[in-house]
Image (cartoon, rainbow, N blue to C red):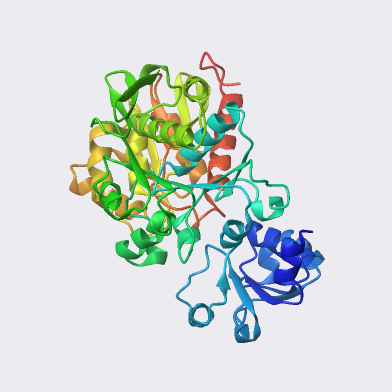
Amino acid sequence: MDTQFGRDWSGRRVAVIGLGISNVALIRFLKRAGAELSGRDQKQGHEFGEGLDELESLGIELILGSHYLQGLQSFDTVVVSPGVPKHLPELQQAARLGRLESEIGLVFRYSRAPIYGITGSSGKTTTTSLVAEMLKRSGLSTYVGGNIGRPLILELEQIGPQDHVLLELSSFQLEGLDQSPHGALITNIAQNHLDVHHTMDNYIRAKQNIYRHQGQQDFLVLNYDDPLTRAMAAEARGRVYFFSLVSKVNPGVYLDGDDLIYLDQGSRLAFARRSELVLPGRHNAANFLAAALFSQLSGANWQAIAEVGRTFAGVAHRLELVDEVQGVRYYNDSIATTPDRTIAALQAFEAPIILIAGGSDKKLSFTQLGEVICSRVKHLILLGVTGPKIRQAVGEAGGVPFTVVEDLGEALTVARGRGEAGDIVLLSPASASYDQYANFMARGEHFRALVQNLKVEYEPEGRKK
């Protein structure tokens, strides 16, 4: 292992709070560096299922359950998982003592390659995936991590100055971060995670850490069509670029008819056509514009960027076409854990939509979603804790036919009965998944399996097998 890691961590007492994928990787890294480790999580051992065996194999102290934060004052460093609330008194004390760390913070500290970071309330995974493809197709060695991919803490020894480190960064990962990437991108800002951040101001401040510590040699890409992100340009230290679907921006990229235009001072280039993009929906046109500009500033070439636009079909659980059964197309948009994401999904289609929505509550408003549902949805299927809230918002906006169900299996049965050839059945819950699933991915995978069962059950001609 790199001698610097050993100098920094050998013999150091470290408590790791939250035993998810990224922190388990971090434990392996710190153990190799010689740290004395204590792994802690509020979940009881049985709640980890088969994962408990992996935790016990780490060979470190494990403190699980309600007392997981006891004794933190005796540790040199406390490393916190992104999802653990930072307002807990024990963690606030560690922060006051300058002992609080995160896996992402250590990636920033030790990476020898320049870091490029992407955040936003929606679209950041699609945009990050697009940028990764554009960089790789341009022949640039790229490591992708943060909120997606493999934890990069395990890759640090392989990452060199010639590489690119591309991070998707959530508000939880950005919260408390005292470094910013060389290149930063904010796709948009909308209500999200208020169940954890409590106020919109707290949420926005966390997002702003992606550029707050930049210098004059760095760059920032902002959404000109979003008033919140557009206003951030005034406090940026590096050079600011914009992307826009409705305005001519300079420097930046924008949509002009069917042309996607790059403009910087007097230099103008039509680098792609919107009609050739594989990804559906206006929001994905914005994601592509953002990715094209960001990747070009990060070293990609325009030819590779255009090729990706013509071939990139999307990311799992994000407007993912699962299958077509008897002329009805089934789309998995399980990533839509906020009303804004579901609004974008509804606006991506012209065909009649049967919408499956509802889940656990993130304390967000469904008022605008109710209005869009009334204008674009043929039949609404509701489930989960937020089902009644969505139903109320839709009713106040005028109402649409709806069915309340207990689970996703029943939802697919109703959708199958209501759907006609040419319709779309869209899972876009506008809510988190935690009332019935471990995460949005598990919810999306269950939806996929249910659709495949329908495919097996019914002949293409409509005859039941």
Q: Is residue 447 above or below residue 44?
A: above
- Which of the 4 quarters of the picture holds residue 214? bottom left
Q: Does any portion of residue 343 appear in the rendered image?
A: yes
Seen at 62% across and 76% down, the residue is: 77
Which of the two residues, 258 or 313, is positioned nearer the viewer here? Answer: 258
Quick check: can you spot residue 403?
no
Left or right: 79 in relation to 370: right
Left/right of residue 429 with respect to residue 16 in the rendered view: left
How many marks the image carries: the answer is 0
Q: Is residue 125 left or right of residue 8?
A: left
Question: Is 29 in front, or is 318?
Answer: 29
Front residue of 191/426: it is 191
The foreground one among 92 and 443 is: 92
Residue 350: x and y in percent read 31, 24
In percent of width and height, residue 312 lies at 52, 26
| Residue found 23% across the figure and 34% down from its top | 375
Vertical arrangement, residue 331 with respect to residue 218, above or below: above
Q: Is residue 4 left or right of residue 78?
A: right
The relative height of residue 362 versus residue 256 in the rendered view (above or below) is below
Q: In which quadrant of the rendered view does residue 454 lie?
A: top right
- Give the position of the C terminus as an image quadrant: top right
Residue 462 screen position, x and y as percent: 51, 17
